[in-house]
């Protein structure tokens, strides 16, 4: 059975000052279905945003952000538990820092925990430990975290659910004729260094962090699929039906490189 990592961002999980329950339920339903075909690891943002639904603190102040995360983490996990209970899926929470990937001992412990939870049909839900990390230890965004989780757990693919449909050949906000790149096999340096801010005030990523995650995985001979988290139709088609209609597949595979060349012509 193939192993996949699904990463969902704050913008998908929250709306204004509330948990986006309908979108979360659609995600939970998809994961429950995908678990029949794959071993699934979920990397979930949203703790700070969930905390803000209960306490109105200034997230730009580092300590306040940690407080929001500490308040929001149980809110987020409680929402997940209530919804996964509908599908009789047992969940676990795993909080990580960069140190867990820098130390062979810590990494091995993390890998063993993931393997054992999956062996016992438990869904691991991973997030960065905002409480105990220092600024030097922060991944800064869960796109990078999810890429490391995918590689170190031996996952075949990372699926990033975002507020965009895929990776475009130009900025769709500036160019109405922009087209989604179906396959990407090479990411240029200028693409990794471009300026791009996240759409949500609670999101810490943007397209650049997703490209960096994809680059990391391509170099490790892994794949990443970027698609819309608001409408999971293309994700379900891709994962369950094996049909690639929308979304961008970042891949190292030679046959996909040939397909990308054809798409560009």
Image (tube, grey):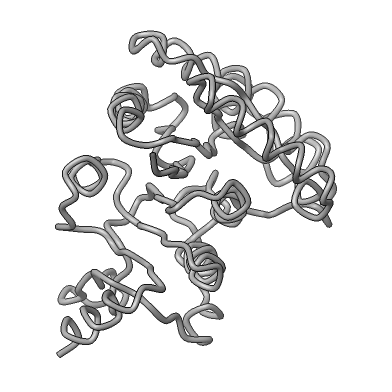
- Image coords of residue 183 (percent x, y): 28, 72
Q: Residue at x 42, y 62 (%)?
A: 223
Number of labelled discs?
0
Quadrant housing residue 95: top right
241 on left or right of 18: left
Q: Residue at x 24, y 80 (%)?
A: 260
- Image coords of residue 152 (percent x, y): 63, 51
On screen, residue 190 above or below 154: below
Direction bottom: furthest residue: 265
On screen, residue 75 above or below 156: above
- Image coords of residue 83 (percent x, y): 39, 14
159 on left or right of 145: left
- Which quarter shows the C terminus? bottom left
Q: Residue at x 84, y 44 (%)?
A: 105
Depth check: give the residue in front, 121 or 129.
121
Q: Residue at x 30, y 62 (%)?
A: 166
- Image coords of residue 153 (percent x, y): 59, 46
70 on left or right of 134: left
Depth check: give the residue in front, 180 or 196.
180
On screen, residue 20 above or below 60: above
Quadrant housing residue 28: top left
- Which quarter shows the N terminus? top left
60 on left or right of 131: left
């Amino acid at each position: 059975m193939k192993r996949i990592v699904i990463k969902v961002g704050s913008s998908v999980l929250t709306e204004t000052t509330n948990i986006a329950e309908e979108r979360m339920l659609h995600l939970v339903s998809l994961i429950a279905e995908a678990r029949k075909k794959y071993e699934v690891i979920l990397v979930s943002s949203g703790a700070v945003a969930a905390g803000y639904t209960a306490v109105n603190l200034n997230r730009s102040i580092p300590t306040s952000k940690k407080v929001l995360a500490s308040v929001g983490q149980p809110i987020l996990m409680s929402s997940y538990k209530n919804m996964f209970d509908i599908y009789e899926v047992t969940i676990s929470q795993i909080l990580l820092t960069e140190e867990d990937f820098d130390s062979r001992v810590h990494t091995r412990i993390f890998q063993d925990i993931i393997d054992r939870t999956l062996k016992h049909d438990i869904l691991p839900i991973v997030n960065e430990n905002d409480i105990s990390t220092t600024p030097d230890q922060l991944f800064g965004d869960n796109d990078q975290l999810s890429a490391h989780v995918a590689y170190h757990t031996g996952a075949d693919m990372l699926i990033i659910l975002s507020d965009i449909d895929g990776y475009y050949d130009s900025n769709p906000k500036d160019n109405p004729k922009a087209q989604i790149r179906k396959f990407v096999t090479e990411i240029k340096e200028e693409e990794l260094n471009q300026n791009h801010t996240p759409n949500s005030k609670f999101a810490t990523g943007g397209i650049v962090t997703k490209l960096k995650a994809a680059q990391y995985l391509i170099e490790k001979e892994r794949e990443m699929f970027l698609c819309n988290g608001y409408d999971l139709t293309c994700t379900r088609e891709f994962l369950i039906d094996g049909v690639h209609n929308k979304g961008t597949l970042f891949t190292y595979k030679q046959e996909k490189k040939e397909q990308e060349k054809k798409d560009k012509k």
